[in-house]
């Protein structure tokens, strides 16, 4: 690693990556190129290049990736109905492979020797970044300061920054960690590490409380083509615009908050609080449209696939043969997921109240409780034989099974 001469660092301009930038240059006597991905995190981008150069970077790549993020990363997980542990909509997880992918592209363009990131040794992000690095550029040197240096926390970093005249604005006390992109806002650590402590209402940035949410319901219609949301209330929207617009609408109704304890890949249980208003609405609408456009057994198989797919994304295995193969299966199922879903938004709830599709498998005359005397699509007398055969294994086997216990 001492032979490293040029490093590409994932850089935000915050305390951690500012110190890392300076530390890398000093420790390795190497050129450091800073890279910041704009994926809708709403951080102040003005002056970021000046700050990076002043801290020691030779240049800054600032890439607007919002549309690519929404189209090529967020929309695929919505098509897959991917939800980790049945509640987490993967907002942070899905962003890391894109950032790491672009980082590798800069390495290749610049002829760099190594990459670096600011993730700690206890979280999931280190795996997500480095899995992608190794998948896209096997053998690339990866430098992770938090796993090697002697600093133990924010107090050490602030002291180092002051000593080295690194331009940062930070305090020793940090109530919690915030990660934001166009899909979600997450809060972890600090005062949230007590899973019994209710988050203060002032913490939330994207959604209103139920008390402050709109007092009247709002109805919206989302049109899908091949599983992708393409129109909102009749108006065409790009993927990024769709998510950002639904974030604003859903946030006004307090939709998309979850407070969960999840199982990290590294084996630690972690409490996270998330706001995902637009993503929540899209997941609900998409799932409901699938209910009328997917054949029963195919829908059930996709449900099983979705859980495995979600674990792959959570673990950072986006660029893997398994995820890519599952994506092909998922996308094949989406050929008929076309139509419109009508949703009522009110006091934290996104409730589907209507759905229609040119590919609908729902047949009113088959589902109706009225007697279809003319067509006899379904003869109720057939049910007797069906139930007799279906229950045959338990009719004779279950009683014997109980005797053997």
Image (cartoon, rainbow, N blue to C red):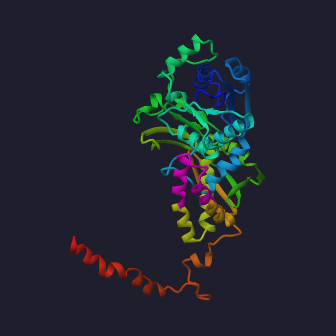
| Residue furthest to the front | 3
Q: Nearer the viewer, residue 165 or 202?
A: 165
For residue 333, what is the image quadrant? bottom right
Examine the rendering and report whether any part of residue 210 can be seen. Answer: no
Quadrant location of the C terminus? bottom left
Q: How many tags in the picture? A: 0
Q: Residue at x 42, y 39 (%)?
A: 268
For residue 13, what is the image quadrant? top right
Residue 81 drawn at (x, y percent): 58, 56
Residue 189 shown left or right of residue 323 in the figure: left
In this picture, is 322 found above or below 154? below
Q: Nearer the viewer, residue 29 or 222?
A: 29
Residue 266 drawn at (x, y percent): 45, 41
Tell me which secondary structure the magenta stretch mostly adopts: helix
Residue 224 shown left or right of residue 191 in the figure: right
Q: Residue at x 65, y 24 (%)?
A: 30
Q: Residue at x 52, y 87 (%)?
A: 379
User: What stretch of residues is rendered in magenta?
Assistant: 305-327
Q: Residue at x 38, y 80 (%)?
A: 391
């Amino acid at each position: 690693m001492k032979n490293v001469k040029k490093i590409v660092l994932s850089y935000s301009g915050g305390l951690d990556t500012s110190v890392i930038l300076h530390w890398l240059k000093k420790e390795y006597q190497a050129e450091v190129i800073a890279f910041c991905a704009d994926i809708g995190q709403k951080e102040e981008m003005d002056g970021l290049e000046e700050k990076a150069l002043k801290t020691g970077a030779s240049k800054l790549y600032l890439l607007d990736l919002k549309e690519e993020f929404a189209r090529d990363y967020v929309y695929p997980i919505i098509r897959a109905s991917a939800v980790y542990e049945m509640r987490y909509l993967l907002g942070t997880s899905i962003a890391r492979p894109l950032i790491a992918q672009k980082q590798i592209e800069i390495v290749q363009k610049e002829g760099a020797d190594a990459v670096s990131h600011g993730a700690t040794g206890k979280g999931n992000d280190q795996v997500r970044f480095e899995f992608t690095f190794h998948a896209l550029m096997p053998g690339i040197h990866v430098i992770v300061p938090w796993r090697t240096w002697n600093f133990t926390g924010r107090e050490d970093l602030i002291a180092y920054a002051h000593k080295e005249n690194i331009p940062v604005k930070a305090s020793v006390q940090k109530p919690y960690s915030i990660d934001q992109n166009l899909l979600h806002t997450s809060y972890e650590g600090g005062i949230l590490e007590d899973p019994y402590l209710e988050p203060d209402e002032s913490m939330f940035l994207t959604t209103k409380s139920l008390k402050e949410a709109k007092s009247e319901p709002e109805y919206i219609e989302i049109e899908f083509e091949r599983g992708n949301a393409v129109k909102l209330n009749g108006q065409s929207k790009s993927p990024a615009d769709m998510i950002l617009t639904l974030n604003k609408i859903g946030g006004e109704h307090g939709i998309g908050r979850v407070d969960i304890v999840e199982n990290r890949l590294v084996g630690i249980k972690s409490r996270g609080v998330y706001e995902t208003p637009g993503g929540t609405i899209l997941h609900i609408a998409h799932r409901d449209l699938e209910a009328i456009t997917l054949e029963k057994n195919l829908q059930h198989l996709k449900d099983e696939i979705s859980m495995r797919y979600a674990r792959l994304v959570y673990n950072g295995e986006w660029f893997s043969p398994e995820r890519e193969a599952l994506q092909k299966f998922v996308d094949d199922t989406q050929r008929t997921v076309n139509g419109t879903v009508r949703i009522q938004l009110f006091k934290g709830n996104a409730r589907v109240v209507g759905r229609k599709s040119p590919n609908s498998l729902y047949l009113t005359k088959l589902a109706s409780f009225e007697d279809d005397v003319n067509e006899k699509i379904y003869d109720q007398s057939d049910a007797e034989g069906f139930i007799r055969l279906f229950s045959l294994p338990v009719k004779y086997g279950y009683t014997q099974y109980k005797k053997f216990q």
